[in-house]
Image (cartoon, grey):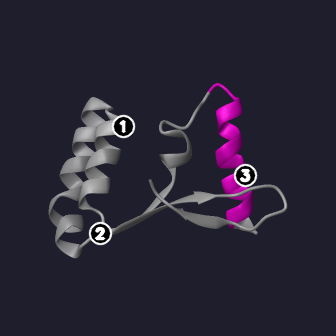
Amino acid sequence: MALELLLRLWQRSDEGPLKRAAGEASLLLVELPLEVMSEQLPLLKANWLGRGETEALLSSLLGLAIRTWRITIAKYEPVSFVAWP
């Protein structure tokens, strides 16, 4: 239940002055090889924080990931994981 409330709050943030940087792709579950997590993920994160290029981060993650999902929730439906992109 806490996860559902958090996700609803997360989605509603688009209605206010603060918005999710990547819309539906702002909350992802990504499966990465261990080597990528320890070596390349910190570099991707540093570049994203330094430059703010969200699209570059997402495309890099997509290229490195084994599998990716975005997390969605709809009224009266359970939390679901949808393959991304």
Q: Is residue 24 left or right of residue 50?
A: right
**Measuring 49% from the left and 48% from the top, which residue is drawn there?**
25
The answer to whether mark 3 and mark 2 are in CB contact below 8 A is no
| Residue with the mark numbered 1 | 54
Which residue sits at x=72%, y=62%?
A: 4
Instruction: Identify the secondary structure beneath mark 3.
Output: helix
Q: Residue at x 14, y 62 (%)?
A: 39
| Residue kind at label 2, given as amino acid type | Leu
Q: Which mark is residue 25?
A: none
Q: Amino acid at mark 1?
A: Thr
Amino acid type assigned to the residue bearing label 3 in the image: Arg
Q: Mark 3 — residue?
A: 8
Q: Which quarter of the figure has residue 12?
A: top right
Question: Overall secondary structure of the magenta stretch?
Answer: helix
Q: Mark 2: few, some, or many residues within 10 Å (few <14, many ≥20)?
A: some
The region drawn magenta spans 3-17
In three-dimensional space, the C-alpha distance between marks 3 and 2, rounded to whole angstroms, equals 27 Å
Tell me which numbered mark, 1 or 3, is placed earlier along the sequence. Answer: 3
Pointer 1 or 2: first along the chain: 2
CA–CA distance between discs 1 and 3?
22 Å
Residue receiving disc 2: 32
Q: Are marks 1 and 3 in contact (CB under 8 Å)?
A: no
> Which of the image's four quarters has the N terminus?
bottom right
For the residue labelled by badge 1, is the local secondary structure a helix, a strand or a loop?
Answer: helix
Residue at the image position 47 percent from the left and 57 percent from the top? 28
